[in-house]
Amino acid sequence: MTYSLVSIILPVHNQADHIPEVLAEYESALVNVPTPHEVLLVVNACRDRSLEVSKELAERYESVNVIHSERGGWGLAVLMGLEAAKGDLLCYTNFARTQAKDLSLIILYATVHPNVVVKANRKIRDNWRRRLGSLIYNLECRALFDLSYWDINGTPKVFPRCFDKLLSLSRQDDLIDAEFNALCRREGYPVLEVPIFSNLRHGGTSTTSYLSAIKMYWGAYELWRTMRSDGP
């Protein structure tokens, strides 16, 4: 199977200082991917010049389109990108954390493994607190949703459009990744995890705090209850 277009969804939140540099790196790396691509910059709830910078990049690169949302939320930005995407291969990733070589690698894996979900498994965390918090969350999701893979929030995530249940994601917050993985398990979509060892950030700092971590732990439990009540 040969894909005709890969849509790359990049949520953008207050990242004006590094969007041009990172996008240029992405475009250079994606030359190694034989499948044509489009890039969807989903600018959401920004208080800096991210929207203006993104529009300038859309004029510079033929592959780039901009979606603007006055509302914020990781999940909402992903959903808006998926709705606008034209590709038969779909990808979304964390713009702040994804290195160009890792993005192209994950997409290449997806092009040679058709009808498989391909996702990153980040092996290195910033510090022991983040490692511990991530471990607890991943263990919780593995137990609740009967998952065999380890990095629930790991991106890039790439999947074919024919896995249409993944186009019905509903979470507009950080729990969209848990919902994504749970749907893969429920629908029997095969998942391939690719280890990623980079922990560099392009800019900004993580917004994860003790409070937000506790909300995610509780949110995963509530998501499990909701999906269980919805049935297969």
Image (spheres, helix red, strand yellow):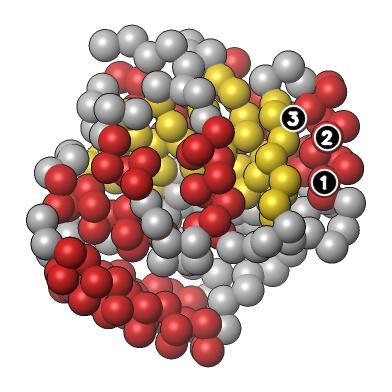
Say few, some or many: other residues with alpha carbon within 10 Å of mark 1 (under 14 / 14 to 19 / 20 or more): many
In the figure, is residue 17 to the left or right of 68? right
Residue 67 or residue 197, whichever sits in front: 67
Relative to 189, 75 lies left or right: right
In the rendered image, which quarter contains the N terminus? Answer: top left
The foreground one among 181 and 109 is 181
> What is the three-letter code of the residue carrying label 3?
Ala
Instruction: Between residue 69 and residue 156, name the one nearer to us.
Output: 69
Q: Position of residue 2 (x, y in %)?
A: 33, 10
Q: What residue is at 26 percent from the left and 22 percent from the top?
A: 114
Inter-mark Cα distance, 1 to 2: 6 Å
Q: Position of residue 160 (x, y in %)?
A: 33, 29
Q: Is residue 215 above or below residue 95?
A: below
Say whether disc 1 or disc 3 marks the residue closer to the N-terminus: 3
Amino acid on which disc 2 is placed: Lys
Which numbered disc covers residue 55? 2
Is the residue under label 2 in contact with that under label 1 (CB below 8 Å)?
yes
Residue receiving disc 3: 24
Q: Which residue is mark 1?
A: 51
Rendered-image quadrant of the C terminus: bottom left
Q: Is residue 95 visible?
A: no
Instruction: Find the distance from the CA under tag 1 to the CA under tag 3.
Output: 17 Å
